[in-house]
Image (spheres, rainbow, N blue to C red):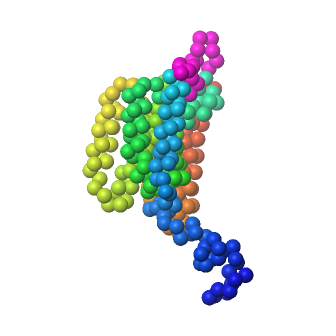
């Protein structure tokens, strides 16, 4: 033990904490949500962009067979004389894989543009782990609402649910920081108009992602410091359970 001004400290603590007795991370700068400020504040955003791009290239190479394997739908036959497939048949992975699936260049371009502009500020404000949870839960929330209220054979794909979650989270963060809300509200309003006027757009994924993203972000940036981790990750756990519950309800409706 090493003598200190009050009592003693272990040598390891002195070495790792520069004589304070605390780990370096304890006094490291934190984001508004309590996350550690990282050197590369776009890392998770870049990884998500890379995954979406890789899946898009794979689709260009493999074609419809891969699309059918990753696509989100409740219950349908995708091939002549093939088995009944879908989330209701136990293929829950489709809720996740469809989030990274795109077929058209314009579709992936629009979604990745949104991710590139909305992702880094949120990643910097929330931290990597919280931002990852926000993105994934927003996308899964959009997938769950699509599965819950759409026709069993209606197909859905794309990162739009997760991107709308980032829209909702950005609005919450700007409100929390007392920034001018008009730019994000105008941009969100334009996207909502497209959501309900263009054919072939899954409004369920957009609205589901938007609501989940806003709720998760609110819990993250308004959590009291004393119980911050409990509130933040507890909220994520509750949202995950609600997503699972919605999928179970729809599965029971479709499968006798």
Q: Is residue 143 left or right of residue 7?
A: left
Residue positioned 69% across, 73% down in the render:
12
Q: Quadrant of the C terminus?
A: top right
Q: Is residue 130 left or right of residue 111?
A: right
Residue positioned 29% across, 53% down in the render:
181
Q: Position of residue 170 (x, y in %)?
A: 38, 50
Asked if one can make out residue 195 in the rendered structure from this viewpoint, the answer is yes
Near-viewer residue (239 or 97): 97
> Magenta stretch containing residue 63, yes or no?
yes
Q: Is residue 176 above or below residue 72?
A: below
Near-viewer residue (93 or 111): 111
Q: Residue furthest top?
A: 80
Near-viewer residue (30 or 220): 30
Near-viewer residue (246 or 226): 226
> Magenta stretch containing residue 73, yes or no?
yes
Q: Position of residue 183 (x, y in %)?
A: 28, 48
Q: Quadrant of residue 20?
A: bottom right
Q: Residue furthest right?
A: 1
Residue positioned 46% across, 53% down in the render:
41
Asked if one can make out residue 143 in the rendered structure from this viewpoint, the answer is no
Q: Position of residue 173 (x, y in %)?
A: 39, 55
Tell me which segment is drawn in magenta. Answer: 61-84
Residue positioned 29% across, 38% down in the render:
190
Q: Quadrant of the N terminus?
A: bottom right
Q: Position of residue 108 (x, y in %)?
A: 43, 31
Q: Quadrant of residue 192?
A: top left
Q: How many marks?
A: 0
């Amino acid at each position: 033990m090493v003598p200190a001004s009050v009592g003693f400290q272990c040598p390891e603590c002195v070495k790792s904490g520069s004589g304070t007795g605390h780990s370096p991370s304890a006094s490291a700068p934190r984001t508004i949500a309590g996350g550690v400020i990282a050197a590369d504040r776009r890392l998770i955003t870049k990884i998500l962009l890379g995954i979406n791009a890789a899946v898009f290239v794979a689709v260009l190479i493999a074609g419809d067979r891969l699309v059918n394997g990753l696509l989100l739908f409740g219950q349908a036959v995708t091939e002549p004389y093939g088995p009944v497939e879908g989330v209701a048949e136990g293929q829950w992975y489709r809720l996740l894989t469809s989030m990274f699936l795109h077929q058209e260049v314009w579709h992936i371009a629009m979604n990745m543009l949104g991710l590139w502009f909305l992702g880094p500020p949120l990643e910097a404000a929330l931290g990597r782990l919280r931002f990852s949870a926000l993105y994934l839960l927003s996308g899964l929330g959009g997938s769950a609402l699509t599965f819950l209220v759409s026709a069993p054979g209606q197909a859905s794909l794309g990162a739009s649910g997760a991107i709308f979650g980032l829209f909702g989270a950005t609005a919450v963060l700007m409100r929390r920081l007392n920034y001018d809300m008009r730019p994000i509200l105008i941009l969100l309003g334009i996207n909502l108009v497209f959501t309900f006027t263009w054919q072939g757009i899954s409004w369920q994924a957009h609205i589901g992602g938007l609501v989940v993203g806003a709720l998760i972000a609110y819990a993250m940036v308004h959590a009291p410091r004393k119980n911050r981790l409990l509130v933040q990750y507890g909220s994520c756990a509750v949202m995950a359970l609600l997503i699972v519950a919605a999928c179970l309800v729809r599965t029971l409706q479709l499968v006798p």
